[in-house]
Image (tube, helix red, strand yellow):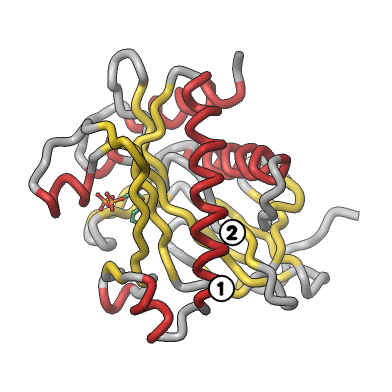
């Protein structure tokens, strides 16, 4: 039996979440809506929901194969999937392999510097406060997660970076940076949640440096829809 969408329990900028008959699972429905700069810029990217849903599911599968648990359960159609219901840890976990975006801005360096080691940082997921940066001791002080959970999150994240970096390198794409979110199952296990998509990662073509991610929307670079289709093609072909 195909699980049915029950009541809408949450609507975010890029996804809707619906209850199902199973209290341990929810249905995520990916939207074409796009926002940037703290919600100040709004738009639509045709086909984005479909790309993000399918890409995220595929990449979570890859990560799961390497022994890291994720929320992914089953894809229902182009834009909808069943995922495990979790309590989201209110942290944006960001890894960078190459300088770009807010890193380049904060530290006054150009984009494109390849780091010897990945950087690792947290932001507090809180729209009212505009997602401020915070460190491990701040996260513990604010009781956002325990020390053990933060260790677990960091270890899993660095492993995920290696898996994704290697995967995309084979596809002729540099994984510049990305954001992850984790959730807690009722028994306290930390699993990867949210999405891995061109909305949450920066992808540069290894040869040409062409941006194949949401920066095309953020920076009005044009060919936004084409970039989403291209990165999807790279993931699923060859
Ligand atoms: N990112 C995200 N959601 C956010 C902030 C950042 O998915 O709310 C992703 C972003 O797409 C990029 C990485 O995290 O791949 C690092 O983003 P950065 O801190 O450079 O911020 P930005 O320049 O996007 O504001």
Please report the residue visible at 64 percent of the width from the left and 43 percent of the height from the top: 63
What residue is pinned by disc 2? 193
Q: How crowded is mark 2: few (under 14 residues within 10 Å), some or many (20 or more)?
A: many
Q: Residues within 10 Å of mark 1 (few under 14, many from 20)?
A: few
Image quarter hosting the N terminus: bottom right
Please tell me which residue is depicted at 33% across the width and 13% down the height of the picture: 207
The percent position of residue 214, horizontal first and vertical second, equals: 34, 40
Q: Is residue 142 above or below residue 163?
A: below
Position above or below: 114 against 91: above
**Residue 150 position in % (x across, y down):** 50, 69
Estimate the x, y position of residue 103 in percent, counting from the top left. 21, 49
Instruction: Say if mark 2 contacts mark 1, CB within 8 Å.
Output: no
Give the camera-side residue of 191 and 116: 116
Q: What element carries label 2?
A: strand
Q: Nearer the viewer, residue 79 or 153?
A: 153
Give the percent coordinates (x, y) of residue 208: 29, 15
Residue furthest to the right: 1
- Disc marking residue 2: none
What is the distance, in whole Å, between disc 2 and disc 1 at their CAs?
18 Å
Q: Residue drawn at (34%, 66%), measured in percent from left and top?
A: 123
**Residue position marked by numbered label 1 in the rendering:** 148
């Amino acid at each position: 039996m195909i699980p049915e969408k029950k009541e809408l329990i949450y609507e975010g900028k890029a996804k809707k979440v619906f209850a199902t008959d199973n209290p341990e699972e929810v249905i995520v429905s990916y939207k074409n809506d796009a926002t940037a700069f703290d919600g100040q810029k709004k738009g639509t990217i045709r086909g984005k929901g479909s790309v993000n849903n399918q890409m995220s599911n595929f990449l979570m599968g890859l990560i799961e194969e390497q022994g890291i648990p994720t929320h992914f359960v089953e894809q229902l159609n182009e834009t909808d999937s069943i995922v495990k219901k979790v309590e989201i840890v209110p942290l944006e976990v960001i890894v960078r392999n190459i300088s770009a975006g807010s890193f380049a801005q904060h530290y006054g360096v150009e984009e494109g510097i390849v780091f010897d080691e990945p950087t690792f940082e947290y932001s507090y997921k809180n729209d009212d406060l505009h997602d401020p940066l915070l460190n491990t001791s701040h996260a513990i002080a604010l009781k956002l997660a325990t020390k053990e959970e933060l260790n677990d999150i960091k270890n899993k994240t660095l492993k995920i970076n290696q898996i994704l970096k290697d995967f995309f390198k084979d596809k002729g794409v540099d994984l510049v940076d990305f954001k992850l979110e984790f959730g807690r199952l009722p028994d306290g296990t930390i699993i990867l949640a949210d999405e891995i998509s061109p909305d949450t990662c920066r992808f540069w073509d290894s040869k040409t440096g062409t941006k194949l991610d949401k920066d095309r929307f953020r920076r009005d670079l044009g060919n936004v829809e084409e970039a989403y289709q291209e990165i999807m093609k790279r993931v699923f072909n060859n």
